[in-house]
Image (cartoon, rainbow, N blue to C red):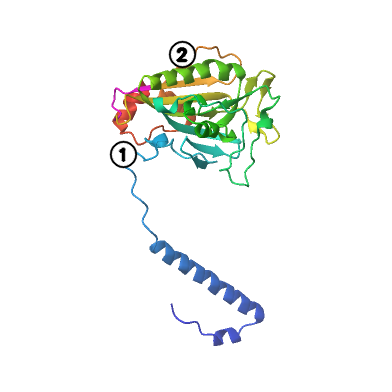
Amino acid sequence: MAKFDKSFLNQLTPNQRALALAALFVVGVAVGLFQSWRNREPAPAPRAPGQTLADRNVRFGPPAPEPKAHHLIERPQFVLSYSDTTKGANWVCWNLTKADIGNAKRQSSFEPDPLLPKSFAHVKHSDYTGSGFDRGHMCPSKDRSDSDENNAATFFTTNIVPQAPKCNQGGWERFESHCRDLAQAGNVLYVVCGPHGEGGEGSNGRATVVGKVKVRVPASVWKVVLVLPGADAVPTRDTKALAVWMPNDQSVPEDWKPYKTTVADVEQRTGYTFFPLLPADVADAIKGR
């Protein structure tokens, strides 16, 4: 870039001189940004279908795309996407095996999540008190009952949504138990679940939010499950998958089967793609059944 003739500035009025210096500053910043762009590191290549991640909780990839309000929390027990808008999870992913199910004592208190930024609202146990909604686990307590530490992680309020008692204690809990039965039989499960919509019906009637921090009450809850016969098994077109979509209200019975659907249906309703690292032909066959 050619040197600027400073004598030119002496011929200008103070106002003209200020404008000229401002223009030079803008040009200099633009040139610097352009050079940075030219020298930037190339973007990493996309992961090929069929590859997997090291984190067992998202072995076949987390749901895609990322929600607009998205804060990722990764723990050994689960991985979740959190929204400070709803004050709850967008989705929660975890891997379930027979070894994860034990006899650890169930925790009794729900605690704010220490991994949330301080600028976020931190939901407390008391935000649910008297609301008419259960503190509904996404990753269930019993799915992480092999140790006290693992069980305690499921009681962070980032893993909790306001859930209608008959939904939480009825069909939803029965489906959780069915998944544990599959794991106890030696299967390895990859699970994703979350809330959807706004406004549910608890024991005190309908509500859209609970607590001082206004935790959003979902209209529905959903779960998708990929079932493999072992830890090293590779999904095929015949791999078993389960999915449910339940209303978050008091109409839900103890039986979960009326709420069965396909993974493809849950994808269509939520806008997510589940297990995105599966090869497309395998994923289409599994999700469509």
- Magenta span contains residue 236: yes
At label 2, the amino acid type is: Lys
Tell me where the magenta segment starts and ends, as one range: 234-241
* Rendered residue at 48%/13% (across/down): 258
First in sequence: mark 2 vs mark 1: 1
Q: As drawn, is 188 to the left or to the right of 256? A: left
Prevailing SS of the magenta stretch = loop
* Rendered residue at 65%/77% (across/down): 15
Q: Report the Cα–Cα distance between label 2 and label 1.
A: 33 Å
The secondary structure type at the circle numbered 1 is: loop
Query: In the rendered view of the protein, which quadrant contains the C terminus?
Result: top left
Q: As drawn, is 111 to the left or to the right of 54? A: right
Instruction: Please determine whether, in this image, residue 214 is positioned above or below residue 15.
Output: above
Q: Position of residue 92 (x, y in %)?
A: 49, 33
Instruction: Please determine whether, in this image, residue 186 is positioned above or below residue 17.
Output: above
Q: Position of residue 218 (x, y in %)?
A: 59, 27
* Rendered residue at 58%/76% (across/down): 21
Q: Nearer the viewer, residue 69 or 133?
A: 133
Task: Say whether residue 261 is visible.
Answer: no
Determine which of the numbered discs, if any, sits on residue 51 in the image: 1
Q: Position of residue 276 (x, y in %)?
A: 37, 35
Which quadrant of the structure image shows residue 126?
A: top right
Q: Nearer the viewer, residue 104 or 283?
A: 104
Q: Residues within 10 Å of mark 1 (few under 14, many from 20)?
A: few
